Image: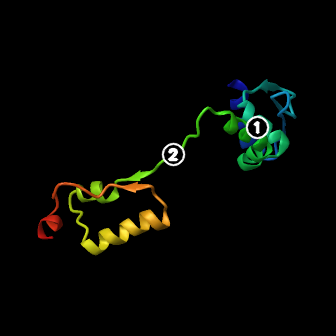
Amino acid sequence: MKLLIKLQSLILNNPDTKVKIDLEKQIFTILSTGESVKFAINPYKKECLLKRLDDIDFLLGIKNLITSFENKKPFKMRVEIMDTTLRDGEQTQGVSYSPLEKLHVAKLLLKDLRVDRIEVASARVSSGELRQ
């Protein structure tokens, strides 16, 4: 912590202050004084920085491992998405969908967003529901 305070002071006095960051050894050094300190870094992030990978590049690099893991699972998992916009939205104070709006939202969710299921049934809670 003292070194960071000192570095801040050095940079304020001289914005051209040079430092060295040794990512492999995880050492930060102020070049003008030679003072250094070790730092911690997440191993995954360290590997990505050293190999110049973003998250997608990293995952593509282990695609075979991922595929192998997926194939070894005893069962195939499928995530289903259920949207409650039409049900919960009508329960929000001041919100009331017209039948045409409900149809538009339902089509958008099912066709464009490819949601697996939508909840549309609810008690008549809004003034718009009471008029329909």
- Say few, some or many: other residues with alpha carbon within 10 Å of mark 2 (under 14 / 14 to 19 / 20 or more): few
Q: Position of residue 12 (x, y in %)?
A: 71, 42
Q: Residue at x 84, y 42 (%)?
A: 51
- Name the secondary structure under disc 1: helix
Does residue 64 lie above or below 118 as drawn? above
Q: Residue at x 49, y 67 (%)?
A: 112
The residue tagged 1 is 65
Quadrant of the rendered image containing residue 71: top right
Does residue 7 lie above or below 100 as drawn? above
**Mark 1 and mark 2: Cα distance apart in space:** 21 Å
Q: Amino acid at mark 1?
A: Leu
Left or right of 29, for residue 118: left
Q: How is the image coloured?
A: rainbow
The residue tagged 2 is 79
Q: Residue at x 73, y 44 (%)?
A: 59
- Say few, some or many: other residues with alpha carbon within 10 Å of mark 1 (under 14 / 14 to 19 / 20 or more): few
Left or right of 57, for residue 90: left
Does residue 67 lie above or below 106 as drawn? above
Q: Position of residue 34 (x, y in %)?
A: 87, 28
Quadrant of the rendered image containing residue 128: bottom left
Q: Position of residue 11 (x, y in %)?
A: 75, 41
Q: Position of residue 29 (x, y in %)?
A: 83, 31
Quadrant of the rendered image containing residue 106: bottom left
Q: Which mark is residue 37?
A: none
Q: Amino acid at mark 2?
A: Val
